[in-house]
Image (spheres, rainbow, N blue to C red):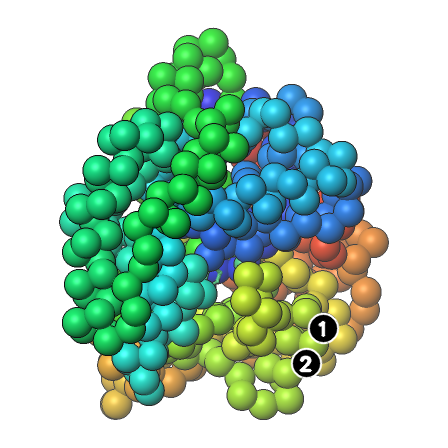
Amino acid sequence: MAVIAVIGGQWGDEGKGRVVDLLAEKVDMVVRFSGGDNAGHTVIGPHGEFRLHLVPSGIFYPQVTCIIGNGVAINPASLLGEINELQRHGVDTSRLVISDRAHVIMPYHTLLDGLEEERRGGRALGTTRRGIGPVFADKVSRLGIRAGDLLNKDGFLSRLESILEFKNAILTKVYEVSPLPLEEIYQQYCRYGERLAPFIRETTYMLHDALRTGKLILLEGAQGTLLDPDFGTYPYVTSSSPLAASGSLGTGIGPMQIGHVVGVFKAYSTRVGQGPMPTELKDEVGELIREKAHEYGATTGRPRRCGWFDAVASRFSVQVNGFTEIALTHLDIFDAFPSVRICTSYRFADKVLDSFPGDVEMLEKCQPVYEELAGWQGPISEIRNFDELPAEARHYVARLEEITCCPVGLVSVGPKREQVIKARSMLPQ
Ligand code: IMO
Ligand code: MG
């Protein structure tokens, strides 16, 4: 099967970047299909450590064409900054392609994202303030500006003029802040358009031509399943779908062509921003995980909330994505733990739930029910063979497979490219 999707199984930051970087060695194209620069994918390779927000994590391989698909929202300043940074470190960016259908984040999107967060006060979502909610709202409201629009200066001006008139009415009358200047934004975005022009093109036919000639394509997810607007902890979610199905819509590749769907999960849970997280540990164990794993946001630097592996949420995630295998990251974080826990069900009032509730207020009240397993209490970062892992670590992995109903194909035992164990993977080798 020619298309593999790599999808976040939890609340984002599962290590998708490093899994994509690992698999990209064998593929011809890596495609981002959703989200925007709210994503922060850390890749550690021969060029050093990079935090990619928009550029696909395949950029470090010379044979890989990297596509920013139609489903992504692009902040041109952020993208140009990232391209410059890569070039400065000697990474070839000539194989980067941007879909002409990708929506563009405008100054009013970031401004409105911040203003909306302020307005929500105590009920703020904790967004990354990158304009993600407003840009995807404009996409479906048919008020968006797309990458291709930046290349047609006259058409862009008249479109921007009418959209900005409306946005300025909201800014001045609803939020009572100053309006944004048309001419300045127009000139600025025309300059972005000129700089991005060499990268912008139609990408759907390009992907289908690649498929026809037997090329291997990897779809790089952003965010995580529990941040999905439909299946996540609504309204504490992002504004584009991080699910495997979105890999089809965000690229123009039919769903039947996606043959492998890899769900990336950490061996524990993290969440950044607001919203329910049943296994959150507000004690020294949570603190220990955060410090050992450096759990601070790659995009905003915020400390991530940490907790035990939530198998109720993860099993749901396996189902809604149809994961064919799991890539389990950060297993080494538990090296010194005397025991580890897995949340196998929730207690809600006098009931025991083994399904993930759609109602966020109900989820807020769910108490985790844990199963405790013995820890392995020894370093595993140098191990490369599954059978050489301590029995307790193998048992932990086997138990996760059992409860989530999905096989674990890869286990990462450290941040470096080579610190990975391929266990029973069904992916093309
Ligand atoms: P990667 O791709 C973790 C979270 C934000 C906030 C919510 C909505 O690195 O896994 P948004 O700015 O999208 O409107 O914020 O979603 N969020 C992420 N959390 N990893 C991400 O991306 C995230 N992208 C958005 O913290 O709670
Ligand atoms: Mg991240």
User: In x, y percent, where is residue 90?
Assistant: 76, 34
User: In x, y percent, where is residue 227?
Assistant: 36, 61
| Residue 429: quarter of image | top right
User: In x, y percent, where is residue 32?
Assistant: 46, 39
Q: Residue at 68% of width from left, 69% of height from top?
A: 294
Q: Are marks 1 and 2 in contact (CB under 8 Å)?
A: yes
| Residue receiving disc 1 | 292
Q: Residue at 51% of width from left, 24% of height from top?
A: 198
Local SS, label 2 = helix
Q: Residue at 39% of width from left, 49% of height from top?
A: 184
In the foreground, 391 or 141:
141
| Residue 301: quarter of image | bottom right
Q: Is residue 344 left or right of residue 382?
A: left
Q: Quadrant of ligand 1?
A: bottom left
User: In x, y percent, where is residue 288?
Assistant: 68, 81
Instruction: Relative to 40, say whether 409 is above or below.
Output: above
User: Can the viewer see residue 232?
Assistant: no
| Residue receiving disc 2 | 288
In the foreground, 363 or 298:
298
Instruction: Relative to 115, say whether 215 is above or below.
Output: above
Q: Residue 339 carries which label?
A: none
**Other-residue count near label 1 (Cα within 10 Å), few / some / many at <14 / 14–19 / ≥20:** few
> Of the residues shown, which amino acid type is indicated by label 2?
Leu
Instruction: Relative to 136, say whether 347 is above or below.
Output: below
In the foreground, 133 or 279:
133
**Other-residue count near label 2 (Cα within 10 Å), few / some / many at <14 / 14–19 / ≥20:** some
> Of the residues shown, which amino acid type is indicated by label 1?
Lys
